[in-house]
Image: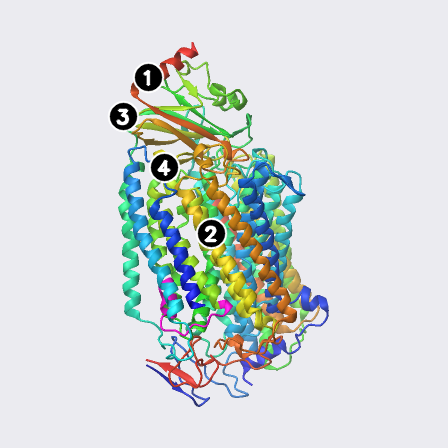
């Protein structure tokens, strides 16, 4: 049977049925041992990013699986009724390796920018000042460098495309070339999204937005950026080694 | 105030927007966004219903010229069919329960002041809205809307020459779906983060109402599935416009060799159904969560087997990703794969059955109040059973041989996904209307609506099973060409008449909805005497949902008829606690 | 209201069940060797699922009436569930569903896991917008070559399937719009499509298979009674999907030989 208790002390509520019910410890005013407003917002933003990246990962998983399936798929020649394989891997331009290096370096600069922004926010918290960003220029320069590197990467990808076209490999030339353009293109679009986020963070910094909001924006963008670098390395390995 | 309460307060203290645009158009308030999604779905469902009416009329009177529209050609019929399916599945079933009610009530039911990312929430609605406009525009371009069905199998959907409507109309269809995918992914992000990170004190996962579990699991399914559909759409767009051959092998259309080779039509089917099967659970899970809620509230009893219900929904979600091949038994896929998929498919029937048993178990020993939300909840259980029973037929490949692509399938998915889910939407509307608009809907009009719809939809979709067993093939624009199909026309006529009457009955609902907003009886804060958090706050809720008082939760969501309690319900935030043994 | 719900739910249930039991609209009479097994399993499934259907709906209606809120009545039973019951009905349901499936899988295996018998009659079935063509290899037992460039649907027959008449093996190939098969002999169909996906569906033979461009799918069935059986296209293929039909005529071996010989003679 159930029991019903009409009164209960607010400091120590009894747990109820329905599973692992609990009340988190009750903080009194002025107690700093719990998560701060900044910590909560940062955690929430990072959680959102992880969730969002899961969605993006599924896009790349489906393209990867289509890639692997297509490679192994024999084609029926209706004239002879013979099944033959029509997969001839496209030679990848060496330029892609240079682009990779550029992107990895940009990950470094991104990380520096992220840590700087985090330090500023921590400072602002300790002094209990809402944190007008004082040294915007220093921070912005690392963000700007990352943007420049990111755009260079994209320009390099475009040049790689031109190089492939010059050798006669267009989007529709062969199944292999279709996938090269597809995978590099989709990655490039997502990276460009990261560039836009960086520009927004840079603008916010120049406009002296609060240090904590800035730190969160830069943090989330940085992790996204690192993930894009990882995704690029994955894509390159897929194209180079799985064929 | 604790830090956490301070945070919530800060977030919303200055946030109440002014001005028509900030308040109603580009609102960041999850309640407004929820209503925006709801009204989008409302227009979509009437468009979708109208298309199906034209379809049913054409089927039994193929050469009749309708006023304004004229004679419906076979290709037009197929366009109506394609757009009916696409609009209903995406812009109604995937929009109203999740984007509409989920957005409105998830934050409130878990005790939060808003969704985790309000700007993203607003964007997700407007992207979805844009997708809707693009979809409708397919009707108005050269060639009209596509005719390849909502499933869009290539090569038919990949070749502009394969049929009328496969030109720009088909491109717009793909683009619309891609936009919808983006909106859905953004929305899923919000739902998941909000559920994991923003529950009020005391609101553990296992104290959440089953509606919240349903929205949460639906969002996870969406997160994992919509990316795959998006990818498939990109590949299709490339095949259609860039000359690639992901899906198109060497084909000859109308005597012309197409400029494609080597692609695999089955690749599309795998990608599409990998999304498509979770999609049907996305369409039904919120309604299942709501049904659990309503049978409990209106029987004045806790839900029978809360944990089992949670595990059942989780298993449905998980298994839902392992059964997609059951749409492909006849496709040319390996018969060994078919066997594997069919075992998984039979397995997924088990958690669905458990939920049905538990709904019955909740009614058992209850004190049932037959308000309109409860009528639709009971109707939902009946329809879910009927639609579910035909599943085990189709899940067995050997029985799928005579039944695949017949009206048996059409009857099955309409009952279990279409009508059952719509009953969930109706139930949600009648249930939450008082909280959203501060007034009650008319109960007598609601009852008329219920009977029209309950009897009417059975009259439409039950006979389809008979048609299917007799071999009546789907997606035929008329039944005049084969002798055995001609013999089935009388039954088709019955279905059409039933459809006309049922569709007419939906205007009762439409009238009730808008009339009650202005003239309905004023509602109290908790007219149904329910226990969940939305009923603890004002009607309609203030901008930050709880007027600055973040709730603290002490009880589970289904504490009805607790022995010893002063009333037959104990609110979740009531500090008087319930402990059961 | 509880009583009305009970009556309506029960009525819907019994009326629906009636039409299933009376077989007012039902599967056409089976005319292939596989039909008996398939139909038997169909019956097993529908009896078992029918019992579940009726039981669930009857209980739903009953509970709606029996547990209606009455002014004088005991309070609702406060219960969060029963774990034993959950386990019992989960296991029973699992046994029912998986059991049904395993029962049917032997039939599936015998239809689909084995290739056609050596003596089977080979018929190439080609689907295109919006007609079916059937090709017989003739006395040499070989199908002549076809070329996509030669396909001309508007010319019908051999041109529709793009038969390469320069190939010697094509000389005795017979292409028709109507499918003929001898009774009691396994037919091996080689299924192809030219343009989009179609599906070769012969309801009486309990046979259905999608025909996919880029694939040549080999399958088999054995007609066991003579007669004319309609063929319907069962995969949306364009505006003419509704009229893409054919006819399978099952005749005695003797009549089949005569028919084929007459078609060969026509070619000279």
Element marked by disc 3? loop
Residue B177, given in percent of the width and then of the height, sits at 57, 50
Element marked by disc 2? helix
Q: CA distance from mark 2 to mark 4?
A: 23 Å
The mark closer to the camera, 3 or 4, is 4
State which tag comes first along the sequence, 4 or 1: 4
Question: Disc 2: which chain?
Answer: B
The residue that label 2 is drawn on is: B459
Q: CA distance from mark 4 to mark 1?
A: 28 Å
Say whether mark 4 and mark 2 are on the same chain: no
Q: Which mark is residue C28?
A: 4
Identified at 42% across, 58% down, the residue is B384
Classify mark 3: residues with Cα within 10 Å, few (<14), some (14-19) or many (20+). Answer: few
The residue that label 3 is drawn on is: C118
Say whether mark 3 and mark 1 are on the same chain: yes
Residue B15, given in percent of the width and then of the height, sits at 66, 74
Q: CA distance from mark 2 to mark 1?
A: 50 Å
Identified at 52% across, 80% down, the residue is B551
Element marked by disc 4? loop
The residue that label 1 is drawn on is: C257
Tell whether A145 sits left or right of B422. Answer: right
State which tag comes first along the sequence, 3 or 4: 4
- Residue nearest the observer in this picture, B374 or B88: B374
The mark closer to the camera, 2 or 1, is 2
Contact between marks 4 and 1 (CB within 8 A): the answer is no
């Amino acid at each position: 049977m159930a029991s019903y208790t009409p009164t209960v002390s607010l400091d120590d509520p009894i747990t109820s049925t329905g599973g692992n019910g609990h009340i988190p410890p009750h903080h009194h005013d002025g107690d700093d041992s719990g998560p701060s407003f900044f910590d909560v917002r940062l955690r929430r933003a990072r959680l959102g990013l992880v969730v969002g990246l899961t969605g993006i990962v599924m896009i790349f998983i489906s393209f990867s699986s289509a890639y692997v399936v297509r490679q192994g798929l024999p084609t029926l020649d209706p004239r002879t009724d013979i099944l033959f394989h029509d997969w001839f891997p496209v030679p990848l331009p060496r330029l892609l390796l240079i682009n990779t290096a550029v992107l990895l370096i940009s990950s470094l600069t991104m990380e520096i920018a992220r840590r700087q922004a985090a330090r500023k926010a921590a400072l602002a918290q300790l002094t209990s000042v809402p944190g007008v960003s004082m040294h915007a220029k220093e921070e912005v320069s690392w963000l700007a460098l990352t943007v420049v590197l990111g755009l260079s990467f994209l320009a390099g990808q475009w040049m790689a495309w031109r190089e492939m076209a010059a050798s006669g490999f267009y989007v529709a030339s062969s199944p292999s070339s279709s996938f090269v353009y597809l995978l590099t293109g989709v990655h490039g679009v997502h990276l460009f999204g990261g560039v836009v986020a960086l520009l927004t963070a840079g603008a916010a910094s120049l406009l002296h937005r609060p240090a904590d909001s800035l730190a969160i924006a830069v943090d989330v963008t940085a992790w996204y950026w690192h993930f894009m670098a990882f995704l690029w390395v994955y894509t390159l390995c897929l194209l180079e080694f799985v064929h | 105030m604790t830090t956490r309460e301070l945070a919530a307060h800060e977030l919303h203290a200055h946030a109440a927007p002014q001005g028509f645009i900030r308040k109603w158009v580009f609102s960041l308030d999850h309640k407004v966004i929820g209503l925006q999604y709801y009204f989008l779905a409302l227009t979509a469902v009437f468009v979708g219903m109208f298309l199906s009416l034209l379809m049913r009329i054409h089927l039994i009177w193929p050469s009749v010229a309708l006023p304004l529209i004229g004679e419906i050609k076979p290709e037009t019929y197929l366009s109506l069919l394609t757009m009916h399916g696409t609009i209903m599945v995406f812009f109604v079933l995937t929009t109203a329960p999740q984007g509409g009610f989920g957005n409105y009530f998830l934050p409130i039911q878990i005790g939060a002041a808003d969704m985790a990312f309000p700007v993203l929430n607003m964007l997700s609605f407007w992207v979805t809205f844009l997708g809707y406009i693009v979809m409708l525009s397919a009707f108005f371009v050269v060639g009209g809307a596509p005719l390849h069905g909502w499933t869009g199998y290539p090569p038919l959907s990949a070749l502009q020459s394969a049929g009328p409507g496969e030109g720009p109309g088909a491109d717009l269809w793909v683009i619309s779906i891609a936009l919808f995918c983006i909106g859905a992914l953004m929305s899923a992000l919000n739902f998941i983060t909000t559920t994991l990170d923003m529950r009020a004190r005391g609101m553990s996962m296992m104290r959440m109402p089953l509606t919240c579990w349903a929205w949460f699991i639906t969002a996870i399914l969406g997160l994992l599935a919509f990316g795959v559909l998006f990818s498939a759409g990109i590949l299709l767009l490339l095949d259609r416009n860039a000359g690639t051959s992901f899906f198109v092998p060497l084909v000859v259309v109308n005597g012309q060799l197409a400029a494609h080779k080597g692609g695999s039509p089955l690749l599309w089917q795998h990608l599409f159904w990998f999304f498509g099967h979770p999609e049907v659970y996305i369409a039904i899970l919120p309604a299942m969560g709501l049904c659990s809620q309503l049978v409990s509230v209106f029987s004045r009893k806790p839900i029978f087997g809360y944990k089992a219900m949670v595990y059942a929904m989780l298993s449905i979600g998980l298994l839902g990703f392992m059964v997609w091949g059951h749409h492909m038994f006849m496709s040319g896929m390996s018969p060994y794969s078919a066997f594997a998929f069919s075992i998984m498919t039979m397995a997924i029937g088990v958690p669905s059955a458990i939920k049905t048993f538990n709904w019955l178990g909740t009614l058992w020993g209850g004190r049932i109040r037959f308000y309109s939300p409860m009528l639709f909840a009971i109707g939902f259980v009946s329809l879910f059973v009927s639609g579910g029973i035909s599943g085990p037929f189709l899940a067995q490949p050997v029985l799928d041989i005579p039944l695949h692509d017949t009206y048996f399938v059409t009857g099955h998915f309409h009952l279990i996904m279409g009508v059952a889910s719509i009953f969930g939407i109706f139930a949600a509307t009648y249930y939450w209307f008082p909280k959203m608009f501060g007034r009650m809907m008319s109960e007598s009009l609601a009852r008329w609506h219920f009977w029209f719809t309950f009897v009417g939809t059975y009259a439409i979709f039950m006979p389809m099973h008979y048609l299917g067993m007799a071999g009546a093939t789907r997606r035929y624009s008329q039944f005049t060409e084969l002798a055995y199909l001609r013999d089935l026309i009388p039954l088709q006529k019955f279905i059409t008449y039933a459809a006309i009457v049922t569709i007419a009955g939906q205007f009762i609902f439409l009238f009730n909805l808008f009339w009650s907003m202005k003239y309905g009886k004023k509602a109290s804060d908790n007219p149904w005497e329910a226990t969940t958090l939305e009923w603890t706050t004002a009607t309609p809720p203030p901008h930050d949902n709880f007027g600055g008082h973040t709730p603290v939760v002490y009880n589970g969501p289904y504490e009805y008829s607790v022995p010893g309690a002063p009333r037959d319900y104990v609110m979740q935030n009531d500090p008087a606690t319930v402990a059961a043994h | 209201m509880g009583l009305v719900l009970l009556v309506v739910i029960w009525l819907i249930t019994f009326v629906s069940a009636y039409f299933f039991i009376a077989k007012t609209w039902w599967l056409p009479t089976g005319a292939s060797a596989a039909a008996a097994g398939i139909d038997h399993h169909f019956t097993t499934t529908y009896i078992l699922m029918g019992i579940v259907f009726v039981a669930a709906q009857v209980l739903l209606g009953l509970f709606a009436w029996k547990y209606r809120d009455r002014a004088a009545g005991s309070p609702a039973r406060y219960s969060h569930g029963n774990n034993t019951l959950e386990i019992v009905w989960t296991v029973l349901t699992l046994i029912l569903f998986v059991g049904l499936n395993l029962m049917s899988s032997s039939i599936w295996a015998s239809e689909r896991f084995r290739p056609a018998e050596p003596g089977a009659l080979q018929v190439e079935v080609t689907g295109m917008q919006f007609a079916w063509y059937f090709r017989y290899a003739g006395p040499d037992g070989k199908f002549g070559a076809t070329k996509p460039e030669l396909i001309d649907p508007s010319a019908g027959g051999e041109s529709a399937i793009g038969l390469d008449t320069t190939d010697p093996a094509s000389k005795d190939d017979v292409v028709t719009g109507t499918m003929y098969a001898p009774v009691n002999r396994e037919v091996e169909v080689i299924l192809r499509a030219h343009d989009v996906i179609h599906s070769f569906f012969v309801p009486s033979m309990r046979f259905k298979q999608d025909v996919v461009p880029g694939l040549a799918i080999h399958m088999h069935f054995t007609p066991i009674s003579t007669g004319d059986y309609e063929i319907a296209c069962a995969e949306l293929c364009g505006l003419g999907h509704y009229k893409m039909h054919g006819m399978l005529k099952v005749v005695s071996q003797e009549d089949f030989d005569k028919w084929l010989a007459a078609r060969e003679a026509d070619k000279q």
